[in-house]
Amino acid sequence: MINIKNNFIDSIGNTPLIKLRAASEITGCNIYGKAEYLNPGGSVKDRAALALVKDAQEKKLISEGGIIVEGTAGNTGIGLCLLGNSLGYKTIIVMNDNQTQEKKDTLRNIGAELRLVAPKPYKDEGNYVKVAQRLAEELKNTNNKGVVWANQFDNIANAKGHYQTTGPEIWEQTEGKVDGFVCSSGTGGTISGVSNALKEKNKDIKIYLSDPKGSALYNYIKNGELKSEGNSITEGIGSSRVTKNFQNAKIDDAFSIDDNEALPILYDLIQNEGLSLGTSCGINIAGAIRLGKELGPGKTIVTILCDKSDKYNSKMFNKKFLEEKKLPIPSWL
Ligand code: PMP
């Protein structure tokens, strides 16, 4: 018997690299996307969920019957809930109410308890991350199997998961020939873990942040100042602060990517390459193309294909919504 996975946990990771044809042709480089959408929960965040749960287990903070509480844009919540289901944990998710209905429905359908809050800045006590932290604290005395706040933004177990798995996988899959890695940052777990793993193998590998408009990280990398401008319909990426995970990332430089640059790439990939990818992938691939142009032909560049477009139907394929935002519309709508 070959390629048998024993359970949910075993089927996380070891995702393929997929060559992105148009991106490679435009740049003369080999541009590969790591197909993280093939994880069992449908996103790159299954890796973070596993790393955070393992951390809680190792610290003996949770056992069967316990509760995981987390503030999330959705994907970490889906990963945590499915993983929790497979281990006998209950999951409570705190999420901003402006995230897509698709993600809210999925979380409820897989059994998460969903608490929606109005979006608030991080400094506000009503911010979803702070609400999740307080909720876990309040519930602590109600469950003797453990109540854990996963804390994906500032628990560096998240980046460690990528350092131990995603980074080494990219190194091995490219047989050490990777010249550049580019991706966006939400918690910073992916870019921190992958950058540290790759730089340890070869310090000359270029690591670039691909940041959506509305995020302060581009200016932070460029001139050390947390300042943002514009906005984006992407979800799960961008930040107004330097998280503990992002803090440890080894980043050489950054691109600021507008939705007007990212969305046509996603629509083109659907139509011509059969890849239906989520919004953050557009920011990532736009960054990979820019890095390819900067490094010159013949280079090998890797980015992350975080999730699929089906979580964003109500935005990516909603003509009225796109028209209102003055964004590109797929030609077939
Ligand atoms: N893309 C999507 C769709 C996500 O949900 C996330 C996580 N919030 C990211 C990218 C960013 O990954 P990370 O949190 O590891 O920076």
Image: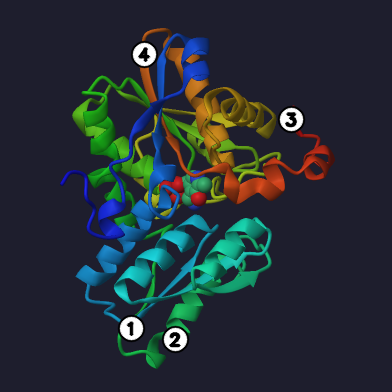
The numbered mark at residue 299 is: 4
Mark pair 2, 1: CA separation: 13 Å
CB of mark 2 within 8 Å of CB of mark 1? no
From the viewer's perspective, tell me whether residue 179 is left or right of residue 118.
left
Q: Amino acid at mark 2?
A: Leu
Q: Earlier in the sequence, mark 4 or mark 2?
A: 2
Mark pair 3, 1: CA separation: 48 Å
Q: Is mark 3 within 8 Å of ligand 1?
A: no
Mark pair 3, 2: CA separation: 49 Å
Mark pair 4, 2: CA separation: 51 Å
From the viewer's perspective, tell me whether residue 162 is left or right of residue 119.
left
Q: Earlier in the sequence, mark 2 or mark 1?
A: 1
Q: Nearer the viewer, mark 3 or mark 1?
A: 3
CB of mark 3 within 8 Å of CB of mark 1? no
Residues 35 and 122: in front is 35
Snapshot quadrant of residue 7: bottom left
Question: What is the crowding at mark 1: few (fewer than 14 residues within 10 Å), some, or many (at least 20)?
Answer: some
Snapshot quadrant of residue 118: bottom right
Q: Residue furthest left?
A: 1
Q: Earlier in the sequence, mark 1 or mark 4?
A: 1
Q: Amino acid at mark 3?
A: Trp
Residue appearing at x 28%, y 70% in the figure: 56
Residue appearing at x 49%, y 11% in the figure: 25
Q: Which residue is mark 3?
A: 332
Snapshot quadrant of residue 278: top right
Residue 182 location in percent, x, y? Answer: 43, 30
Mark pair 3, 4: CA separation: 34 Å
The numbered mark at residue 98 is: none
Question: What is the crowding at mark 3: few (fewer than 14 residues within 10 Å), some, or many (at least 20)?
Answer: few
Q: Which residue is mark 2?
A: 139
